[in-house]
C-alpha cells in the first residue's frame, strides 16, 4: 500500500498538504513553514486527494479548526 506524508502549515494550522512518503517539500517556496505531522496510507485518503497527488505531486487540504 502506498503511503503519504502529511504536513501542517505552522503559519496557518488549518492548512495541510499530502505528498508521497519521502518526497519532502522541495518545490514549495515556503517549505520552512511546514511541519511533518505523520504518515497515512492511501486507504485513509479521499479519492479526490489521491487524484490530486497523482497529478500534481501534492494535495492541499483545509482542516477543521477543531
Image (cartoon, helix red, strand yellow):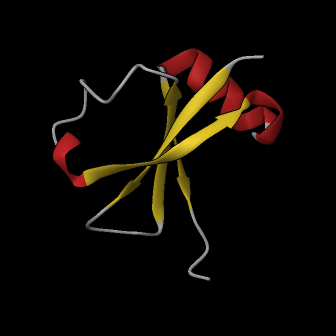
Residue 53, image x, y percentages: 57, 25
Residue 22, image x, y percentages: 43, 20
Left or right of residue 58: residue 32: left
Seen at 73% across and 31% down, the residue is 41
Left or right of residue 2: residue 12: left
Task: Answer with the quarter of the image where residue 48 lies.
Answer: top right
Left or right of residue 4: residue 58: left
Relative to 12, residue 52 above or below: above
Residue 32, image x, y percentages: 17, 46
The quadrant of the rendering that contains the C terminus is: bottom right
In this view of the protein, which residue sits in the foreground, 22 or 45?
22
Residue 29, image x, y percentages: 16, 37
Task: Answer with the quarter of the image where residue 51 lies.
Answer: top right
The quadrant of the rendering that contains the N terminus is: top right
Relative to 14, residue 35 above or below: above
Relative to 24, residue 64 above or below: below
Relative to 20, residue 6 above or below: below
Left or right of residue 46: residue 30: left
Seen at 21% across and 40% down, the residue is 31
Amino acid at each position: 500500500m502506498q503511503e503519504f506524508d502529511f504536513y501542517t502549515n505552522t503559519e496557518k494550522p488549518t492548512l495541510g498538504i499530502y505528498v508521497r512518503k519521502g518526497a519532502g517539500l522541495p518545490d514549495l517556496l515556503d517549505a520552512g513553514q511546514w511541519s511533518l505531522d505523520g504518515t497515512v496510507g492511501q486507504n485513509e485518503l479521499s479519492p479526490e486527494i489521491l487524484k490530486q497527488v497523482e497529478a500534481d505531486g501534492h494535495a492541499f487540504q483545509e482542516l477543521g479548526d477543531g
